[in-house]
Amino acid sequence: MNGEIAAILAMDGIASGAIYVLIGLGLVLIFAVTRVIFVPFGDIAAFTALSLASLETGGRPGTVGLVAVLAILATAVEATALVRNRALHRLPRALLFYLVLPLVPAAAVWFAAGTTLSMPLRIVLSLALVLPIAPLLDRIVFRPIADASVLLLLTVAVALHFALSGLGLMFFGPEGVRTKPLTDTVFDVAGLIVNGQTLLILAASIAFCGLLFLYFEFTIQGKALRATAVNRIGARLVGIRPTSTGTIAYLLASLLAGISGVLIAPVTTIFYDSGFLLGLKAFVGAIIGAMVSYPVTALGAVMVGLLESYTSFWLSAYKEVLVFGLLIPVLLWRSLSFSGTEEEEAEE
Amino acid sequence: MALLSIDQVTVAYDKVEAVRGVSLAIEPGQIVTVIGPNGAGKTTLLGAAIGLLPWRGRMSFDGIDLRRLDVEARIERGFCLVPETRELFGDLSVSDNLLLGGYSRRRDSAGLKQSLTDVYGRFPRLSERRDQKASTLSGGERQMLALGRALMVKPRLLMLDEPSLGLAPIIVREVFRIIASLRELGVSILLVEQNARAALETADFGYVLETGEIVHSGAASALMHDPRVTASYLGGHHDAGLEARGPKRMSGPGGPRSEEGELR
Ligand SMILES: Nc1ncnc2c1ncn2[C@@H]1O[C@H](COP(=O)(O)OP(=O)(O)OP(=O)(O)O)[C@@H](O)[C@H]1O
Ligand SMILES: [Mg+2]
């Protein structure tokens, strides 16, 4: 392997790492605020890619049906809860948030089907289509068991992944898709050919990490999210609703996952079930960050990308094996430091 | 009309009833104290009133049935709790803790700024430490932060669970001075204390809770001279009131405090 190949592989690795970074940060965000390890999170990225591809060919994305089904289920769950708590006066609000709002992008896509949309519009529409999925799943599945142990929540999340894969097959079909490149530009950086797509991935990843940081540091909503993560009771006692911050976390994380789906769609063929591996690789990064640290998660995700890139050159058949093999020592190391922090907390 | 009315309220953990048929009322502008030994159910009562624990009976705040309000809705109406465990946001800075205290008023940014200035004026120490993480504060500073954070809610009724817990005497005195001064702002207070003398000196009205039931109640000044109360809670000698108390004992009933009460 010469220097040039090494550099190209590094470039590739960093680019796919940058995609895992976005998904990994979303995973950490959801976990911090809701304590749910949202296993089907990669699916959000994959569904965005599939929606984008479908809009490109003038089709009607399967997401429309998926969101409609979830919105109806969520509305039913919420309405039942309101009836049981004798809080029917909150029904109009519930209908707005669980039925009308999630279906607005779906309806827009429904009516726009067949017309040719510009690329930015297609991207915005696919993001908007996908955004309600995770919050709706939260309402249907996780909110009724919000006080359960992390382990139970994880088990349910795994089950949810299988359910969502089934729905994915039903609504998107078994074909793989690949979208048109976002840009055809090619740069020559110090004799090395770098294509614009790679740079775009990097730029988008860095930009969204920066935005996330600003949101957490400088907005009251962002601080409320952190407060919920640090101390749920404390948050409730100042009037922060963990269910609301949970919804914001799901929306924000879905946006990150959606962006990564848009970025990855032109470079990899995406199937209805591709999300699982994407999510799992991002999860390795998140585990390196102990599910709490955003910067370490980002570093971990880039490491996973690099590892994947180099192993695919040397031992492409073992690429996945090696990446997940890495998970084992990291998990061991992290489980040691995890139990350390728990003891510290117990002492307080 | 009472600001907070608690009527025949029972609170149970699984099968064990920690609070049984308790009734009490707080009028606007009043300071009411609930005293009692370890494990009497004081914290449990406050937890139920703020909506963190399930309860039976009737409770209303400002005429609204508390069954209809969740914790956050209580906070929005100015009914808040500084819990025994404080529940600060350890990873966040002092100023962020205070800012989040005003979360329920986040649309009133001018009012929030004013409240923040007030809190810093009241607790200059917090102002000095404003960029420090809450988890790095000392016990007394944490207590000030917990109080300050609750004041940011702009409370109408503030429930304080053992605000003097683990504080040095000089700071205990300061805390009670602040509690008394809050009355001038029109804040009503429900004060739970084991430091019975200081609590009764500050309050207008008092209740004595023992093993989940109210056993005495009356004007604070009357309770202070009631022999049954002085014997168990005021420990005979006169200056026991504002003494410092050490860190909390581990178990519920039968801790050193209640033993002390029973022996005398
Ligand atoms: N989470 C819980 N589960 C079961 N029992 C509990 C729980 N919390 C408290 N108790 C019990 O309820 C009773 C009342 O406890 P509570 O904490 O309300 O007492 P307290 O008056 O606040 O005491 P202290 O002065 O020690 O703070 C005790 O017997 C305690 O053991
Ligand atoms: Mg207590």
Image (tube, rainbow, N blue to C red):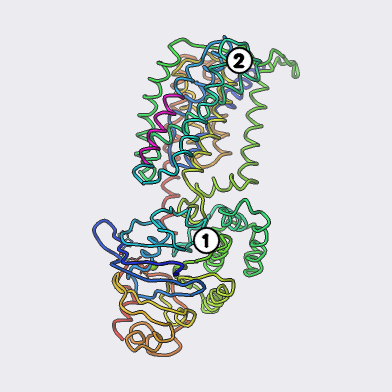
Which chain does the residue under circle 1 lie in? Answer: B
Is A48 situated above or below B52? above
Q: Quadrant of the C terminus of chain A?
A: bottom left
Q: Position of residue A122 (x, y in %)?
A: 61, 18
**Is A264 one of the magenta-colored residues?**
no
Please indicate, yes or no, whether residue A344 appears anywhere in the rendered image.
no
Pointer 1 residue Cβ closer than 8 Å to ligand 2: no
Question: What element does badge 2 sit on?
Answer: loop
Question: What element does badge 1 sit on?
Answer: loop
Horizontally, residue B13 falls left or right of residue B143, namely left
**Is A75 one of the magenta-colored residues?**
yes
Mark 1 crowdedness (10 Å alpha carbons): few <14, some 14-19, many ≥20: many
Residue B138 lies in quadrant = bottom right
Please indicate, yes or no, whether residue B239 appears anywhere in the rendered image.
yes
Q: Position of residue A31 (x, y in %)?
A: 47, 39
Q: Position of residue B258 (x, y in %)?
A: 32, 77
Q: Nearer the viewer, residue B207 or A45?
A: B207
- The residue labelled by disc 2 is A1
- The mark tally for this picture is 2
Q: Amino acid at mark 1?
A: Gly
- Our reading of the magenta stretch's main secondary structure is helix
Magenta stretch in the rendered image: A68-81
Mark 2 crowdedness (10 Å alpha carbons): few <14, some 14-19, many ≥20: few
Q: Are marks 2 and 1 on the same chain?
A: no
Is B17 situated above or below A72? below
- The residue labelled by disc 1 is B78
